[in-house]
Image (cartoon, grey):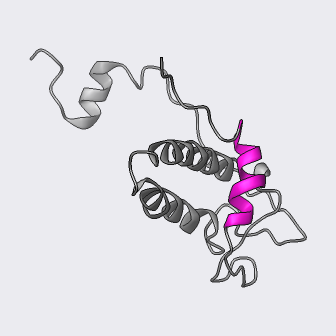
Amino acid sequence: MTGQPQPRYPNVVDWVESWFAPAINRRLWGKPGQPGKRWCPRWWAHPEVVLRLNALWRSWEAAVAAGATDANAMSHWWLNHCEPHLRVVLDSEHGPMALCSQEQHVDRGGLDVEPVPAGWWDRSAVNRRTNRPAAGR
């Protein structure tokens, strides 16, 4: 009986430290907040980076497994998964690590949110806000 293939790496941390970081060879330049690319050695302290790298790791594992039957799996991973995430993660103007340097981590925090008012998600209230008729009418 054939089950799911075992992942090459047990978690995203091992994958980043053992495969991803050594494999990515980009010129990182520019001052914080200026055009270029930026990487923070404390990548794990940036929630968005962790979420994106976790998604990359999981899709990488799937591509590696698919490579046995799909010769294009890794190319697809690089072009359609890795590159779009790297554009955001390494963006030194607006990315999650934009204010960091090799010597200093800067926590930018997440998005500000306000509590959702009671009843906001009630079906009739949503329909009024979106000008949609209530279901069944």
In the displayed orientation, state which residue is furthest to the right: 103
* Range of magenta residues: 10-23
Residue 100 as seen in the image, left or right of residue 111: right
- Asked where in the image residue 126 lies, by quadrant, the reply is top left
Q: Nearer the viewer, residue 5 or 40?
A: 5
Up/down of 130 relative to 77, above or below: above
Up/down of 115 relative to 108, above or below: above
Residue 52 as seen in the image, left or right of residue 129: right
11 magenta-colored: yes
Give the percent coordinates (x, y) of residue 91: 61, 71
Q: Nearer the viewer, residue 107 or 55?
A: 55
Residue 54 as seen in the image, left or right of residue 127: right
Up/down of 51 relative to 77, above or below: above
- Asked where in the image residue 128 lies, by quadrant, the reply is top left
Point 63% across, 50% down: residue: 53
Point 64% across, 81% down: residue: 36
In the displayed orientation, state which residue is furthest to the front: 1
**Magenta stretch: dominant SS?**
helix
In the displayed orientation, state which residue is furthest to the left: 137
Point 53% across, 47% down: residue: 64
Residue 126 as seen in the image, left or right of residue 72: left
Give the percent coordinates (x, y) of residue 88: 56, 64
Point 50% across, 22% down: residue: 3
Give the percent coordinates (x, y) of residue 11: 71, 38
Give the percent coordinates (x, y) of residue 97: 71, 64
